[in-house]
Image (tube, rainbow, N blue to C red):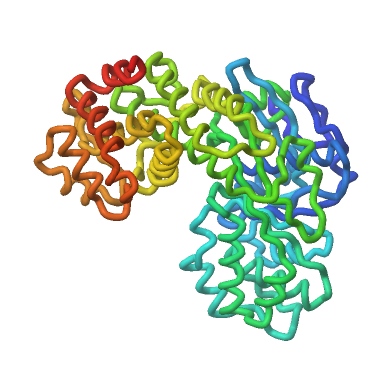
Amino acid sequence: MSVRRLSRREDVAAGIAKPAFDPSRHGAGIVHLGVGAFHKAHQAVYTDAAIAAEGGDWRIVGVSLRGTAAAAALNPQDGLYSLIVRGEEGVSARLIGSLARVIAAVRDPVAALDALCDPAIRIVSLTVTEKAYGIDPIAGAIDLAHPAIAADLQTPRAPAGVLGLIVESLRRRKGKGVEPFTVLCCDNLPRNGLLVRSGVLDFARRAAPELVDWIAGNVAFPATMVDRITPAPTERTLDEARRLTGVEDLAAVETEPFSQWVIEDAFVNGRPAWEAGGALFVADVAPYEQMKLRMLNGAHSMLAYAGFLSGHALVRDVMADMELARLVARHISAAAATLAPLQGIDFARYGAELEARFRNPFIAHETYQIAMDGTLKLPQRLLQPAEAALRMGQDPRPFAFALAAWMRYCCGTTDKGEAYALRDPREAEIRSALEGACQGVEISDRLHALPNLIGLALSRNSHWRNEVASALDAMLRLGVPAAARAAIAA
């Protein structure tokens, strides 16, 4: 027997919560570029809560820039989908009603541009990855070669890239006397608002220079900090949604209980009451990004190197190792001590939430995956807080142990002699630097000497160098598990 497809016209099973509002009674006020799992588990959920709390025409028109799968899954379901939350306390689920429809721009670019030009749209949000903000080698080049800036505003041609779509829609809105929208980047990038603003203005200088000053003076680009682990949906996700709803849901998504959204409060044409879903509005997002980099990402890197070298494939396995779990807690606490107080944040509570997230048995984060690209991640995650700890007279050993674990990882073999690729953009340089080195001090000296990485403040600090070399020597002599036990006992 066939199973009915999820839609607002069909009843669902009692095992799942329905939206607390009638989606059909609320219009769209947001266009979102890049309708993926993270958007459905994060911004769309906050918007659902905002509409439920205070109403308003704030539903979302999604634009899929690279494929048709999101439109095919969501449009027959009237934009509804199941949000499945997996945590240590079990599984819960609810239906999200904030998505109105999805436009597949690859199939209908004119419809995507029309949506962006709609006067009802007051916010354009994005989750499209860092690469998409550059000049896309195909779409961006086409947009710049043939910009749609003819006097005829009804030209059927539409840009194909993110920056082209934003600039062209702003040009048309200005030409018709329509107020501009706020551009809200929700990608996990430092200073993401500034990044997108720079990209939009640069594109406008090339394609429509007469717009540059108007965009600079009238369009807002708030920065945001986003955080929620959201694995790609699997057949298990769809099976769980079918069990909970009693109908077929091809757009279901699963995630963790934790969710965080910090937003610079700078909008030009209104916004939803996202604070109803727990969003935090602040004047400056940068300190919150720093908190995440040092506490979450720094601890993640430390446990990835130490865990991988200890034979733990997944983060949750690392947290099941008592000594390593204690080192994670120590690192989080040390990172918090380098930060200035933050509005709305209790560092102790945030740290406890991080540990719970790392332990989540339903999230399969691979330590080897987190360990990649270390030379790109170390400065913000480990080295800057280490410098801060030394300036503040704090114990640098948690950060020294983390850097030593990275250095031990750079040796390229496990304690059992099994080789692995470093998967780092400077891998060849690292391997060349370590050729013939076998002692902790020697390895530490050579890696500290790599240009444009560790920096003079740490490299010239004898106390720091001694702590790193000592931790690395213990890892090489005793193995990482025993070195972890020694570090936590010290």
Extreme residue toward the left, this view:
436
Question: Looking at the image, which residue is at 81% across and 43% down?
Answer: 273
Report how many numbered discs are placed on residues in the image.
0
Question: Looking at the image, which residue is at 84% across and 36% down?
Answer: 9
Picture quadrant where residue 367 is located: top left
Please state the horizontal and vertical placement of residue 403, each as a whole percent of the image. Answer: 32, 36
Q: Is residue 436 left or right of residue 469?
A: left
Q: Quadrant of the C terminus?
A: top left
Please state the horizontal and vertical placement of residue 442, each as a whole percent of the image. Answer: 15, 38
Whether 472 is drawn above or below 274: the answer is: above
Question: Looking at the image, which residue is at 55% across and 22% down?
Answer: 356
Q: Is residue 466 left or right of residue 252?
A: left
Whether 210 is drawn above or below 250: the answer is: below
Extreme residue toward the bottom, this view:
151
Please state the horizontal and vertical placement of residue 337, each as a whole percent of the image. Answer: 51, 32
Question: Looking at the image, which residue is at 30% across and 32% down?
Answer: 405
Q: Quadrant of the N terminus?
A: top right
| Residue 192 visible in the displayed image | yes
Picture quadrant where residue 250 is located: top right
Q: Is residue 195 left or right of residue 453?
A: right
Q: Nearer the viewer, residue 16 or 366?
A: 366
Whether 272 is drawn above or below 251: the answer is: below
Q: Nearer the viewer, residue 137 or 402?
A: 402
